[in-house]
Amino acid sequence: MSFGKFTDKGAEELTALGYSVVSRRYRQVARVDRPDWQKRMKQAAGRGDMGPDWYRRCISTDVLTVTQDVMRAMTNSRDCLRGYVEPPQ
């Protein structure tokens, strides 16, 4: 398991940016990191209907490690149906 870079951002800010928990054991959160994520998923898996949870867990390169308190306040990836969220400029 590769560890994402550590962030000190809070749960609300990370959730607004599209992050959700992909590993409680390693305190990792990830987001759908590209607008054409369904096309990329189809290239990687041969099908594009697996949803944003699978993309965040298996393909996303935007993975962060958070504190235990932040992780507890965030939703699991499987419960988050959000796809790509444009980061603020």
Image: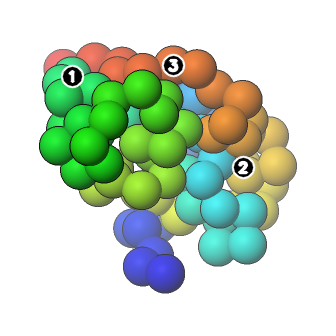
Which mark is first along the chain, 1 or 3?
Answer: 1
- Considering only vertical position in the picture, is 35 above or below 56? above
Q: Is residue 26 visible?
A: yes
Closer to us: 48 or 84: 48
Query: What residue lies at 42% left-to-right and 68% top-to-bottom?
Result: 4
Mark 3 element type: loop
Question: Looking at this rendering, what residue extends furthest in the front direction?
Answer: 46
Q: Which residue is mark 1?
A: 35
The amino acid type found where label 3 is placed reads: Arg
Q: Which residue is mark 3?
A: 82
Closer to us: 66 or 26: 26
Q: Are marks 3 and 1 in contact (CB under 8 Å)?
A: no
User: Callout 2: few (<14), some (14-19), or many (20+) C-alpha neighbours within 10 Å?
Assistant: some
Which mark is first along the chain, 1 or 2?
Answer: 1
User: In the displayed structure, does residue 64 sit left or right of residue 42?
Assistant: right
User: In the displayed structure, does residue 27 sit left or right of residue 14?
Assistant: right
Q: Picture coordinates of residue 62 (x, y %)?
A: 33, 51
Q: Which residue is mark 2?
A: 70
User: Callout 1: few (<14), some (14-19), or many (20+) C-alpha neighbours within 10 Å?
Assistant: few
The disc placed on residue 52 is none
- Considering only vertical position in the picture, is 87 above or below 62? above
Which quarter of the rendering shows the C terminus? top left
Q: CA distance from mark 3 to mark 1?
A: 12 Å
Q: Picture coordinates of residue 44 (x, y %)?
A: 23, 50
User: Callout 3: few (<14), some (14-19), or many (20+) C-alpha neighbours within 10 Å?
Assistant: some
Q: Picture coordinates of residue 27 (x, y %)?
A: 66, 65
